[in-house]
Image (tube, rainbow, N blue to C red):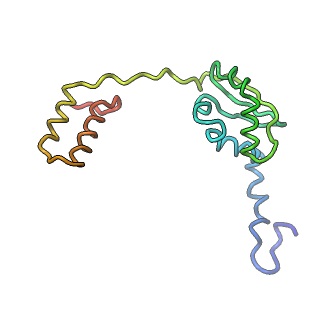
Amino acid sequence: MNSDERHVYGPRPVSALMPRLTRAAFRRRAPATAQILADWAAIVGPAIAAVTTPRRLASGTLTIACAGPIAMELQHLAGEVIARINTHLGSQVVTTLRFVQTPELAQPPSLSPPPPDPAKLAAVDASVGGLPEGELRGALASLGHAMATSPNRPRSS
């Protein structure tokens, strides 16, 4: 039965509509590629996912964009990465990995936050000092300390 024909016994089944609905999406990206893109961090872990991005899957070769020297490390882990991907997908989809280096994935060096200003911490303690001892006072003091030491806090005028 053609999916354009009206079903004799009532409405058409959803399965008859699926090929038309998914054709455009699958033309751009295969279901396995979409699954790898969606679950990349779960497949390889957050540390590797932070410096890599899967780009393309064609003929069993997965192209992975990566930053700097991580490509060398991933070449050594290629067998394990391929096994993880294929286990996640439930079939032998990926047979080889190809790496391309891209500078935009390089992580900037992490900066440690500046040390807290003792005067601000003392001001926070003084502002909650009039409250009775308990969970509320402790929570407000913790919140005040976090705000006083946060590097992204708004500037007071």
Q: Nearer the viewer, residue 112 or 153?
A: 112
User: Where residue 51 sits: x, y (%)?
Assistant: 60, 28
Q: Nearer the viewer, residue 42 or 28?
A: 42
Q: Nearer the viewer, residue 84 or 27?
A: 84
Q: Nearer the viewer, residue 10 or 99?
A: 99
Q: Quadrant of the C terminus?
A: top left
User: Where residue 111 sits: x, y (%)?
Assistant: 42, 22
Which residue ends up furthest to the right in the rendered image? 1
Question: Which residue is rendered at x = 63% and y = 23% of the image?
Answer: 67
Which residue ends up furthest to the left in the rendered image? 130
Q: Quadrant of the N terminus?
A: bottom right
Q: Which quarter of the picture shows residue 5?
A: bottom right
User: Where residue 78 sits: x, y (%)?
Assistant: 74, 29
In the drawing, does residue 32 fall left or right of residue 155? right
User: Where residue 33 sits: x, y (%)?
Assistant: 73, 42
Which residue ends up furthest to the front in the rendered image? 133
Question: Which residue is rendered at x = 67% and y = 41% of the image?
Answer: 37
Question: Which residue is rendered at x = 65% and y = 26% of the image?
Answer: 66
Q: Which quarter of the picture shows residue 19?
A: bottom right
Count every numbered label the image shows and give the total. 0
Position above or below: 132 against 121:
below
Position above or below: 99 against 56:
above
Question: Which residue is rendered at x = 82% and y = 36% of the image?
Answer: 60
Position above or below: 113 against 9:
above
